[in-house]
Image (spheres, rainbow, N blue to C red):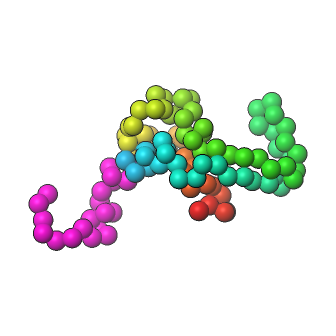
Amino acid sequence: GDSDRPVTMDDLKEMKYLECALKEALRIFPSVPFFGRSLTEDTKIGNHKFEKGQTVIIVPAAIHMDEKVYPDPEKFDPDRFLPNNVTSRHPYAFIPFSAGPRNC
């Protein structure tokens, strides 16, 4: 609304949809183009086998555009990040700043 006072941290905490919009913008335009991880153990993903010590490159934009996770992925839709829409999604399906212990 109309107010002459500056926005406070308490105001920002109440702006839940703004948070959804920011997350959706970061989903489409992640701040980290790619990051690497060195495997600490042998790993299999689908039919692909990776050996301990290998480095894998992770591209957040590719993950964020997966139609199985984000239907119509090129559409800007902040509702994707409403609480009831996030609960069934894997925690690493949204990684705009990397993920894990070396997260940005």
Q: Is residue 17 left or right of residue 96?
A: left
**Residue 95 within the segment the image draws in magenta:** no
Vertical comparison of 69 with 12: above or below: above
Q: Residue at x 48, y 32 (%)?
A: 73
Q: Is residue 10 left or right of residue 95?
A: left
Vertical comparison of 62 with 22: above or below: above
Any part of residue 80 in sight: yes
**Residue 7 within the segment the image draws in magenta:** yes
Quarter that holds the C terminus: bottom right
Any part of residue 93 in sight: no
Total marks shown come to: 0
- Chain part drawn in magenta: 1-20
**Residue 25 appears at what percent x and percent y?**
43, 46
Q: Residue at x 80, y 50 (%)?
A: 55
Q: Indicate the quadrant where residue 66 lies.
A: top right
Q: Residue at x 42, y 40 (%)?
A: 80
Q: Nearer the viewer, residue 86 or 27?
A: 27
Q: Is residue 35 left or right of residue 11?
A: right
Q: Indicate the quadrant where residue 7 lies.
A: bottom left
**Residue 63 appears at what percent x and percent y?**
60, 39
Q: Is residue 47 left or right of residue 67?
A: right
**Residue 94 appears at what percent x and percent y?**
55, 46
Quarter that holds the N terminus: bottom left
Tell which residue pokes out farthest to the front in this image.
33
Q: Residue at x 29, y 60 (%)?
A: 14
